[in-house]
Amino acid sequence: MKHGRRQVQTHPFLDRIKLMETTNSMEYWWPHTTHTYWKLQDPNSLPTISLPNNNNKSQRRNLWSILIALYFSFIYVIQFILRVLWIRDRKTAITGGEGVDLWPRKIATATFSLEHMKTVKNAVPNATINDVLFAVISSGISRYLDFREPNGLQDGVQLTGLAMVNLRKQPGLQELSNLMKSNSGAKWGNKFGLFLLPIYYHRSNSSDPLEYLKRAKVMIDRKKRSLEAHLSYKIGDLVMSTLGPKFASLLNYRIPCNTTFTISNVVGPQEEIMIGGNPITFLRANNSALPHALVLNMVSYAGKADMQVQVAKDIIPDPEFLAKCFEDALLEMKEQVTTKI
């Protein structure tokens, strides 16, 4: 490590909440400073990370909501097990598979305005930024497949995304010094579950752009009600403890082989920051060693969000065009909202 520069490497499956904590801990590596992860406007304070609203957790659950949660949990866990064992997505122009994790990669960036995403979010009651992101991905992939396979796909073909969900109880960023205390209640290492997030191909000129958001919200709300992420973690933990790491690794590898893409979204600082006195212009994240031909990682920062579009270049040779499809999808939704106002 050279003074003034530090590279942070993490496990490919590590949720980026821990990466943010690692970045926040850089203060211990810089001499003669109190903090190295600063708000640009206020060098004496750490950046603000917005936390999810957990008011629903404080509400008393009635019998009906428990039954709904159990129903969706049962359905999604069965789907998860079948997906691991043999069910796979239909092959398309963006499908990866076994061995693709070793293929050469290309990267492009899709940049979104958080204000535009909030405008679209407000068009559907109780929608979230995650709902908007998934709607943008659904629409953008449909646009791209229209270009690559103009007559090759029927309307409604399912493509499945894989999302990793942070299962740690502590919300937001935690100080590493606190995590190292014996009574902190925090575990080191990965603790994440998996969501299978299906999208459906629709010709880009045949649907109201906001329909993508409405469908995404319904699907993600059902996922949130279920215990899919927690049960997928428990299944993996059980397989690891009973059958060993070799078999567990094989099952972990089959999940991305049988799905189409990976998606992650991490909330970054709301203000511009600097590290060691150097202003930061953007925050971007990538992971590798996945058999998906398409890996999408979004990090928000200071009013915008950058989504890294990482592809296997022999399958998706034009990631810049795919990134433009995602950007155009959000703009089309935003224009649809503003014309209705």
Image (cartoon, grey):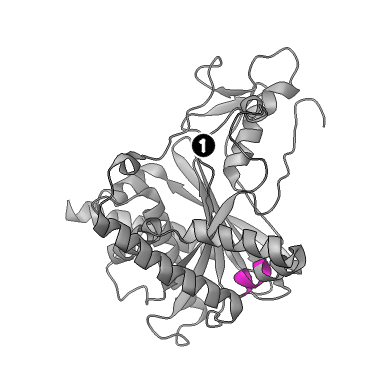
Q: Is residue 317 left or right of residue 78?
A: right
Give the image location of residue 284, x and y in percent. 60, 45
Farthest residue to the left: give it.
341
- The residue identified by callout 1 is 170
> Callout 1, which amino acid?
Gln
Q: Position of residue 116 (x, y in %)?
A: 35, 47
Tell me residue 111's x, y (percent). 49, 49
Residue 113 lies in what quarter of the image? top left
- Left or right of 102: which side holds 260? left
The quarter holding residue 273 reads: top right
Magenta extent: 252-257
Q: Residue at x 31, y 50 (%)?
A: 121
Q: Say which of 207 and 268 sits in front.
A: 268
Q: What secondary structure predominates along the stretch shown in magenta?
A: helix
**Left or right: where 337 falls relative to 320:** left
Asked if residue 19 can be seen in this view, the reply is yes
Q: Residues within 10 Å of mark 1 (few under 14, many from 20)?
A: few
| Nearer the observer, 33 or 234 | 234
Q: Work out which quarter of the rendered image holds the N terminus and state it.
A: top right
Residue displayed at 54% across by 62% down: 232
SS for dot 1: loop
Q: Residue at x 28, y 49 (%)?
A: 61
Residue 322 lies within the magenta run: no
Q: Is residue 256 magenta?
A: yes
State whether residue 237 is above or below residue 85.
Answer: above
